[in-house]
């Protein structure tokens, strides 16, 4: 991961108003975030916590009420960024009567890709998302998992540096989920920056380097997944070649008994536990931030 900041929000806030301009919902309250090149960054939060609002503000599809959203150092409303960005929305918006090949060709043309480059890119993407056998079928015949795959291929047609994925594994079976996670990790290996939101905490735990947890539009937690999941007040000792006596006497005894200390560290909790704890805490004490680690 490099130090280059790809995405940044500063005191980003969004108030949805009704037809008469009266305040309806404060969907996002003073969000400060930075995402660096090469990171897989997860936005988590219960329903209605402001994840999609954040993504739409970063895509420039919504305008902030206060604060700013910067993408590649420029305001998110700057359309030039779209050349370098790919987006997989939660709901499919693709044309049902086109085949996978036609769909990718259509989006390739929108990016003004020459036909030979387009053809090669389409072949690569169809193979990457595993749709070789279904590439000539209309999308209306696709299962949910296949629709997710073609959605990802579409998001990657312009070989974007930054990829935004809204619920990338929703509706996928365990195998499809594993494959989607592998594809995300492969994109990370290629140096792409990925921002995803998801309800599926195990998926987030498997692929994200850092996460932000939102609750009722407020940032409640931000940090590296491995650090957030450490349980600081519990010590875990893993050792091998120890006798039962030695195990009982723990650390100091290990060297005396010629055992081998394999690791001495903090065990981790699951992201699911951390998430539920933050939501519970936040509901019990509204307005208080759980503490950024
Ligand atoms: N167009 C809109 N007009 C009014 N309120 C809206 C609008 N879009 C979202 N909201 C409200 O803003 C808040 C945040 O919604 P948002 O869709 O960003 O949440 P989310 O975290 O993505 O939720 P989910 O997990 O259910 O997709 C919610 O209270 C929602 O009702």
Image (spheres, rainbow, N blue to C red):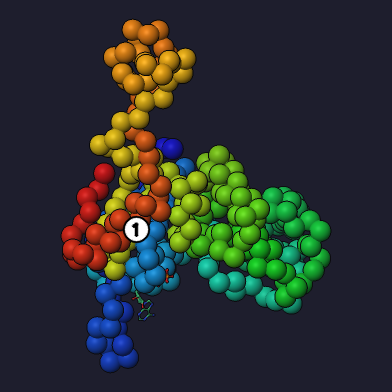
Query: Which quarter is ligand 1 in?
Result: bottom left
Asked whether the viewer can see residue 120, the reply is yes
Residue at the far bottom in the pictured view: 20
Q: In the figure, 22 relative to 177: above or below?
A: below
Q: Nearer the viewer, residue 263 or 141?
A: 263
Q: Quadrant of the C terminus?
A: top left
Q: Quadrant of residue 137?
A: bottom right
In this rendering, position of residue 175 left or right of residue 218: right
Asked whether the viewer can see residue 60, the reply is no
Q: Which residue is mark 1?
A: 276
Q: Quadrant of the N terminus?
A: top left
Percent across and percent down for residue 159 are 60, 52
How many discs mark residues in the rendered view?
1
In this rendering, position of residue 213 left or right of residue 139: left
Q: Kindly state the secondary structure of the residue where label 1 is placed.
A: helix
Q: Nearer the viewer, residue 101 or 180?
A: 180
Q: Residue at x 56, y 59 (%)?
A: 169
Q: Residue at x 28, y 83 (%)?
A: 24
Percent across and percent down for residue 152 are 61, 59
Q: Quadrant of residue 176?
A: bottom right
Residue at the far front in the pictured view: 245
Q: Nearer the viewer, residue 49 or 7?
A: 49
Mark 1 CB lies closer than 8 A to ligand 1: no
Q: Residue at x 63, y 59 (%)?
A: 173
Q: Nearer the viewer, residue 292 or 80?
A: 292
Percent across and percent down for residue 248 are 34, 21
Q: Residue at x 62, y 55 (%)?
A: 174
Percent across and percent down for residue 20 are 28, 92
Q: In the figure, 207 relative to 263: above or below?
A: below
Q: Quadrant of residue 233?
A: top left
């Amino acid at each position: 991961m490099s130090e280059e900041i790809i995405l940044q929000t500063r005191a980003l806030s969004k108030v949805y108003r009704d037809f008469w301009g009266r305040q309806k919902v404060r969907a996002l309250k003073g969000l400060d975030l930075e995402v660096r090149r090469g990171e897989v960054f997860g936005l988590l939060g219960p329903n209605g916590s402001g994840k999609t609002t954040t993504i739409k503000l970063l895509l420039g599809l919504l305008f902030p009420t206060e604060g700013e959203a910067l993408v590649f150092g420029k305001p998110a409303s700057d359309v030039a960024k779209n050349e370098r960005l790919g987006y997989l929305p939660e709901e499919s918006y693709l044309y049902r009567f086109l085949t996978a090949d036609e769909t990718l060709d259509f989006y390739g043309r929108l990016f003004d890709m020459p036909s030979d480059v387009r053809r090669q890119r389409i072949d690569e993407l169809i193979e990457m998302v595993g749709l070789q056998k279904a590439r000539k079928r209309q999308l209306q015949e696709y299962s949910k998992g296949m629709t997710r795959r073609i959605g990802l291929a579409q998001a990657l047609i312009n070989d974007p540096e930054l990829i935004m994925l809204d619920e990338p594994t929703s509706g996928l079976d365990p195998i499809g989920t594993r494959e989607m996670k592998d594809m995300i990790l492969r994109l990370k290996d290629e140096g792409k920056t990925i921002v995803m939101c998801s309800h599926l905490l195990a998926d987030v735990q498997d692929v994200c380097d850092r996460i932000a947890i939102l609750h009722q539009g407020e940032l409640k937690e931000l940090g590296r997944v491995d650090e957030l999941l450490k349980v600081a007040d519990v010590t875990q000792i893993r050792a091998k070649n120890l006798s039962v006596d030695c195990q009982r006497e723990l650390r100091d005894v290990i060297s005396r008994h010629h055992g081998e200390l394999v690791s001495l560290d903090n065990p981790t909790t699951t992201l699911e536990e951390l998430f539920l704890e933050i939501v519970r805490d936040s509901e019990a004490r509204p307005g208080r931030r759980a503490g950024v680690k």
